[in-house]
Structure formats: structure tokens, C-alpha cells
Image: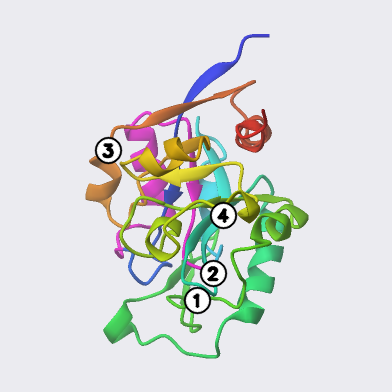
Amino acid sequence: MNNVELLYDFHIHTCLSPCGDDEMTPQMIVDCAIAKELDCIAITDHNISGNCAAAMKYAEDKDLIVLPGMELQTSEDIHVVCLFDDLYNALDFESYVKSTLPPLKNDASVFGHQTCIRPDGSTYEEEQMLLVGSGIPLYGLYELVSAHGGIAIPAHIDRESFSVGAVLGMLDPYMGFPLVEVWKDSSLADAASVPYIQSSDAHNIDMFFDREYHSISAEDKSISAVFKALKTMGIK
């Protein structure tokens, strides 16, 4: 059977991330992804997966795959995209992440709103401050996320902040990550001979549209096939 090439964006923030624009609702993101002719996306808010269900529900009758996920901030303040093929697994991991966060409340006037949108359209403000490091270290994270049915991918390793490159300056094989994400510059991944994906890390509509998107090869256009393709990219 021939594989299909699917345009993707596996790193998108909604209005639940305090640094995400209020217009970045799950419905708006799905509509914009369809307008950009993407085949698959992932919802990856900071330390939380609360808006994944709404995005997945809205996309049910549309020609778009939505992976549930989050962008975890490790105890070293390194961002890691965590993706799942099952909403239950994503929310189970979210519960664990929340148990490690410091007990701080968000100040929306300083950091921005954290608006969670339920599948029925109702909303509430997430009180837990999300722009903080969790109590989860980078080393051992791949195994931890795998145990929750997901895959962990160090985010935007070429960025000057909150990245493996900025904090540690290198990709250590002992970190255990077979796959990384770059934003624009793939030189660090190339030097380490590690496969990579490229996504928008969009926090607003302009960032979402102002991108050249890339494709992933999958057995078919389904959430399970896309997740399998990601899991096997780093297997040699």
C-alpha cells in the first residue's frame, strides 16, 4: 500500500495558553487549518490539554486530523511537545503534569487569559498559572510520556529561549529523544543526525498563516496512522 503525504502543524497554541491570542479558539484554529489546506494538526497549550476536546469535536465531520497534546515546560525550563493519539491519554498525562506545578494562580492582567472552551462551547478561566516550569525533568521524559501512550518531542530546538539548544547547547543521545522539532534552523538536528519536524508554534492567526508547511508520510489519513508515522520517524 502506498503512503500518503500529509501537510501538518503539530505545535499550535489556543486561547488557553496565556500567551495565546483570545481569537485562537479551537474552532478558529480548525477553520484556519482547513483554509491552509492542512491535513493534520495538534493542539499544544502550555502544560495543559484542556482545549483539545473542543478542537477534536469540531473537526469530527471535517477532513482534518487533530492530535491532542501539550507543550510541557520541564523543570529545566525546556519546552517539549507531547503528542497523543487518544484524548484520554492526553488528559491523564495532564493530570500528572498539574500535580507537579507550583501552586500559583494566574494573573490575567499580567500574563493573559487562560480560557478553556468545552466541546459544548461553554467557557471558563483556568486558574492554575501555566507559564511555569513543571516538576518533570528532561532526562527520562521520553519514557514517561511513552508510558502515558504519547510521544515527547523537544520543541523549537533552534530558539534562543526555552529550548534544548538555548539551555543545554546540545542534543545528548542519553536524553532518549528519537525525534525533535525545529522552528527554522535545522543545523543542530542535522549535526546530531536526529530526524525532525517543523511546525509553527503559532500563538496568533498571523503566525499560523505566515508559514511554509511540511508533510509527513503516513499509511493513511487517520489519527492512528499519523501518530504511528511520528513514532517511527526516529527508528532506524
Q: Is residue 146 left or right of residue 67?
A: right
Question: Gap in Å between the C-alphas at discs 4 and 1?
Answer: 17 Å
Q: Position of residue 60 (x, y in %)?
A: 57, 40
| Residue range of the region highlighted in magenta in the rendering | 21-47
> Mark 1 against mark 3, which lies toward the viewer?
1
Point out the tag, 4 or 1, that comes first from the N-terminus.
4
Circles 4, 2 touching at the beta carbon (< 8 Å): no
Residue 211: which disc?
Answer: 3
Q: How many other residues sit within 10 Å of disc 4, few (<14), some (14-19) or many (≥20)?
A: many
Is disc 2 placed on a helix, strand or loop?
loop
Q: Position of residue 75 (x, y in %)?
A: 54, 75
Residue type, mark 2 in image: Thr
Residue positioned 42% across, 65% down in the render: 167
Is disc 4 placed on a helix, strand or loop?
strand
Residue labelled with disc 1: 133
Question: Gap in Å between the C-alphas at discs 2 and 1?
Answer: 5 Å
Is disc 1 placed on a helix, strand or loop?
loop
> Mark 2 against mark 3, which lies toward the viewer?
2
Q: Is residue 157 left or right of residue 51?
A: left
Circles 2, 1 touching at the beta carbon (< 8 Å): yes
Residue type, mark 1 in image: Gly
| Camera-nearest residue between 204 and 81 | 81
Which quadrant is the C terminus positioned in?
Answer: top right
Whether residue 9 is visible, yes or no, is no
Residue labelled with disc 2: 74
Point out the tag, 2 or 3, that comes first from the N-terminus.
2
